[in-house]
Image: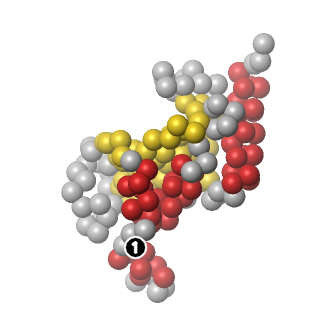
Amino acid sequence: MMSAADGVKNHLRALLSHVDKYDLAPLRAVHVTNGYEIGEDRTVIMARVRDAGLSPVAWALVNWAATLEATSAVLWRPADGGVFLGVKGKLPCGAQVKVYGFVMFGVWTLSGVEPGHFEDIPISRLLEYAQTRTVGEANDDKGGK
């Protein structure tokens, strides 16, 4: 019987192998469990992409979604002034993974999304966000004003 620690190590190895295989963007944080402490969906891996503007976060998630099986996407705006975007799916080894990123919220970012809003969104909406350049991102290209 495999120990919980061995299970965590195997999932972490699978995640790192997946990142390398598909040349995915570096992760900011990773949380790996034995699958019992997160709930009934049996997610064992939560990974956070680098926080950035809407387009870069969405691109990172679109790239992840293209490499996972059984993917879905979510949008959540907590009350603290930002928006979380995420994808959920399975690694080839079968491990459930959630990959998410944080976008600072502004008038130019996802207008009409109220604090507390949570919804499942199609991957195609992430692609739309990825192709959208916001005012803040355009300024970043010019030295960030």
The residue under the point 75% across, 46% down is 17
* In the displayed structure image, the side of residue 16 where residue 68 appears, left or right: left
x%, y% of residue 116? 27, 43
In the rendered image, is residue 14 in sight? yes
Q: Residues within 10 Å of mark 1 (few under 14, many from 20)?
A: some
The residue under the point 72% across, 26% down is 7
65 in relation to 44, above or below = below
The residue under the point 49% across, 48% down is 100
**Where is the C terminus found, in terms of image quarters?**
bottom left
The residue under the point 43% across, 68% down is 131
x%, y% of residue 44? 60, 31
* In the displayed structure image, the side of residue 4 where residue 33 appears, left or right: left
* In the displayed structure image, the side of residue 33 where residue 10 appears, left or right: right
In the rendered image, is residue 49 in sight? no
* In the displayed structure image, the side of residue 144 where residue 19 appears, left or right: right
**Where is the N terminus found, in terms of image quarters?**
top right
Residue 10 appears in which quarter of the rendering? top right
Question: Which residue was labeled with disc 1?
Answer: 133
Figure coloring:
secondary structure
x%, y% of residue 97? 57, 38
**Amino acid residing under circle 1:** Arg
118 in relation to 37, above or below = below
Q: Residue furthest top?
A: 1
Element type at mark 1:
loop
x%, y% of residue 110? 29, 60
Q: Nearer the viewer, residue 17 or 78?
A: 17
